[in-house]
Image (tube, rainbow, N blue to C red):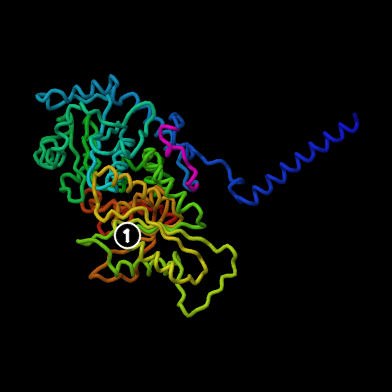
Amino acid sequence: MKLMITVVTFLLLCSVMLLSFSNIFKHLLLGSKYSVKPRDKLLGGLLTADFDEGSCLSRYDQSMRKPSPYKPSGYLISKLRSYEMLHKRCGPGTDAYKRATEQLGHSDENHVRSSGDECRYVVWMPMFGLGNRILSLTSVFLYALLTERVMLVDQRNDITDLFCEPFPGTSWLLPLDFPLTDQLDGFNRKHSYCYGTMLKNHAINSTTIPSHLYLDIFHDSRDQDKMFFCEGDQAIIGKVPWLVAKSNLYFVPSLWMIPSFQTQLLKLFPQKDTAFHHLSRYLFHPTNQVWDMVTRSYNAYLSRADEILGIQVRVFSKPGGYFQHVMDQILSCTQRETLLPELVSPESQVTNTSRSPKLKAVLVTSLHPEYSDTLKNMFWERPTSTGEIIEVYQPSGERIQQTESKLHDQKALAEIYLLSLTDKLVTSTRSTFGYVAQGIGGLKPWILYEPRNNKAPDPPCVKAMSMEPCFLRAPLHGCQAKTIKITPFVKYCEDWFSGLKIVDVSNEF
């Protein structure tokens, strides 16, 4: 009996020791993977847990993403939960939505009485390329958040192929039987319900409130349309039940300069340059089809790297294509800023004493594959001065931008998210594609200056002041002109002289 007890005890001790050694070995073999804390699926409270994870894998999948160093404020989290309740109460299919649309159903009723108890709405219309659409949609959502409106999006394009529903228990899609659906495409600055046109014709004031308004917020909008950003005009617009917004811009910086909004914005975003970062991670969750593209590319080409460098190349010249001066500029920027190593001459002998040299993956996104091909050949043919191994990967090279093509947009969205997963990022001047990637990833990129006269500029690039996108063609000379000059956290964009961007003053330099 004693012998049996001794044997059993010995076997138990061996099992414990083997398990312990197994865990130690596993820890040593796989490094920090087993020592890190579980990923924060709710992004610090930014997301709600009220979704089925399988329905949208990207929403809670944090396996590829580094935890963001930027934490959402308690006020932003509270505001988002309140908005979700508002959307559920006023969204499509509710009695409130039915009552609100009935105001639009009678063409002979041009004006309505304002009621503080009724739901108010803003309808977003997609315009221009994917980057422009994401930036304008984020801007419209922030406006809805600030004004307690329900945001609905036009579903007649490929938005359902790109993004999952962001609000639980309801839909952000504008129903196809919306009373103004047949008129939406005809809304332009000549339309009688365009706000700028109504101002010009003296057809709107604080006592004459239309049932709906069209907002024209484009790079070439008229001065009257830019009155949207004035405090007094917001008091009038706020009484209109339905707004239809078309824009190709990230107009958030000018929302910051509306006094009644700024008070809220300071509470929502104490670190001012995190607005797009938080809102984009809240709003945009790629569909399972797009997320599969992201995960397959990341796992196959990027996951093993010690460091990932993203290079986003946009050539604005017409015709576009591969240009040697652009390639020279990319190399000049990345090597000056030590983002990529120099190459050694064929005559030099480089002995790498490291048994496991550092692996750097370079993710290139461009319509033209020749830029990544050039980099591949360079680092294949000659060793680096640092001994690093450089692997270059480009997911696609479509050559021509195919706006509103489902598969093209899905590939583009996947590439935006891949860029957002990089450790360091180089983007092209005025590229909305790059703006979105840097904002989602919380990255301050190096921005390639626009070449002039087919020559690489010197210096070739500049480090961004913040991760916020630029409001290209901001209204600089209207009601906000004085405010721009005295607001320390509003700066002219590094890559566009007529653009504005938000910076966090404490981290400006």
The answer to which image quadrant residue 427 occupies is: bottom left
Q: Position of residue 319 (x, y in %)?
A: 20, 61
Judged from the image, the secondary structure of the residue bearing numbered disc 1 is loop
Q: Which residue is mark 1?
A: 369
At 31% across and 53% down in the image, what residue appears?
A: 470
Residue sitting at 24 percent across and 60 percent down? 316
State the residue lying farthest toward the right.
2
Q: Residue furthest bottom?
A: 347
For residue 31, side relative to residue 98 (left or right): right
Q: Quadrant of the C terminus?
A: bottom left
Q: Quadrant of residue 244?
A: top left
Lateral position of residue 245 relative to residue 50, left or right: left
Depth check, front residue: 208 or 152:
152
Q: Is residue 499 above or below residue 169?
A: below
Determine if the magenta segment contains residue 77.
Answer: no
Q: Please give the range of residues in magenta.
A: 54-66
- Image x and y of residue 46, in percent: 44, 37
Q: Is residue 222 above or below residue 75?
A: below
From this viewpoint, is residue 75 visible? no
Residue occupying the point 59% across, 46% down: 36
Residue placed farthest to the top in the image? 95
Dot 1 alpha-carbon crowd within 10 angstroms: few under 14, some 14 to 19, many 20 or more: some
